[in-house]
Image (cartoon, rainbow, N blue to C red):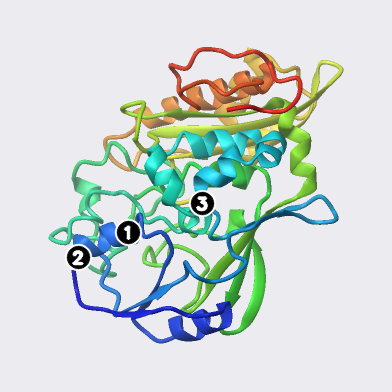
Amino acid sequence: MNRFEYVRPRSVAEAVAAAAIPGSAYLAAGTNLLDLMKIGVARPERLIDLNHLPDLDIIEQLPDGTVRIGAQVRNADLAHDPDFRQRFPVVAEALLSGASAQLRNMATVGGNLLQRTRCAWFQDTASACNRRAPGSGCDARGGENRMHAVLGWSEHCIATHPSDFCVPLVALDAVVEIEGPAGRREIPLADFHLLPGDTPERESVLAPGDLVVALRLPAEAAGFAAHARYAKLRERTSYAFAVVSAAAALRIADGRITEARLALGGVAAKPWRARAAEAALAGATPDAAAFRRAAEAALAEARPSGDNGFKIELARRIAIRALTLAAAGTPDRLPALPASAFASSSTPRPRGLHV
């Protein structure tokens, strides 16, 4: 690990000013950054510690029904917050399917958004990686790449974004609040992460010094609570990132889907909103045929980036599973293995969600 300067700001303004200096990085829980520093992938010259800033660890309901989540809220605290999990059960399920309980107790929601890819070539400093060293090439293109992207990839990078949390957030139109040298701005989470294109080193819209201070979920997103599920397929059920995942949320009235939301994880460099699938579901009967059509629409533009063509069909199947589970109703109590294909079924949720 390289030597670095440690800075503990007293306010968001101080943090932004300190981080605007080249070579700086923000430190929240450090569950991703410190690992990357230990293996030499991240080599910041200054760490700006956010853990003592006031008011970034609050979950609040705004007068219009919007829920605002401070960037320093811990994953476990959000997932277990009674009001939040009742209104946004699919987000709670996604959070509880990620990492271990110990990591969820430490990791922050802002840090979750900014996770770096788990691509093995990115994490190996002896390998060529355009994301880590622009212009060096992409060894993943000719190497072990069965876990890599099938949507939105380019010749320069085929890595995927690892977050579970971001997948339902994208489906529910979450908004990111950013404080930076140029002031405060907001951006939909769907536009926050960038596809690799010719510049895979640019992973998000953040500029130097920009700090994620909060996330917001609109009040209308709570209208999906009765029919919303997250499904995740991984190579081992505990403590593993998704091979593919899906967040599905439906509004159903008189036997028809009046509105649908669907997002996929593990398939691209960003959580993937499947808008064509959502359009295909509008007005449809919530049955196997409709869900198959939606899954086909969601993966219509998918193509292998290497030895991973199987992920396309796998992603179709996880989308169908998530939609089927959502149509059956959000369970009153999440299973012991949230989002797992091996979880036992639960009673449909009449009221609040319990974990």
180 shown above or below 239: below
Do tag 3 and tag 2 residues touch (Cβ < 8 Å)? no
Circle 1 sits in a helix, a strand or a loop, which is it? loop
Q: Which residue is mark 1?
A: 156
The C terminus sits in image quarter: top right
Q: Nearer the viewer, residue 88 or 60?
A: 60
Q: Which residue is mark 2?
A: 40
Image position of 260 with respect to 64: above or below: above
Q: Residue 306 occupies which quadrant of the picture?
A: top left
Residue 238: image x %, image y %? 35, 29
Using a 10 Å C-alpha cutoff, classify the residue at mark 3 as few (fewer than 14 neighbours), some (14 to 19) or many (20 or more): many
> Could you tell me how far apart the alpha carbons at marks 1 and 2 are, in whole angstroms?
22 Å
Residue 59 vertical placement versus 336 (above, below): below
Secondary structure under badge 3? loop
Looking at the rendered structure, the kind of residue marked 2 is Gly
Q: Report the residue at 50% width, 12% height from top.
A: 344
Classify mark 1: residues with Cα within 10 Å, few (<14), some (14-19) or many (20+): many
Q: Secondary structure at mark 2?
A: loop
Q: Earlier in the sequence, mark 3 or mark 2?
A: 2
**94 and 57: which is toward the camera:** 57
| Crowd class of label 2 (few under 14; some 14 to 19; many from 20; radius 10 Å) | some
Of labels 1 and 2, earlier in sequence is 2
Q: CA distance from mark 3 to mark 1?
A: 34 Å
Mark 3 and 1 residues: CB-CB less than 8 Å, in contact? no
Residue occupied by mark 3: 74
**Residue 143, position as x, y percentages in the image:** 18, 45
**Residue 313 seen anywhere in this rendered image of the structure:** yes
- Nearer to us of marks 3 and 1 is 3
Quarter containing the N terminus: bottom left
Q: Amino acid at mark 1?
A: His
Residue at the image point whose x is 37% and y is 56% from the top: 116
Amino acid marked by disc 3 = Arg
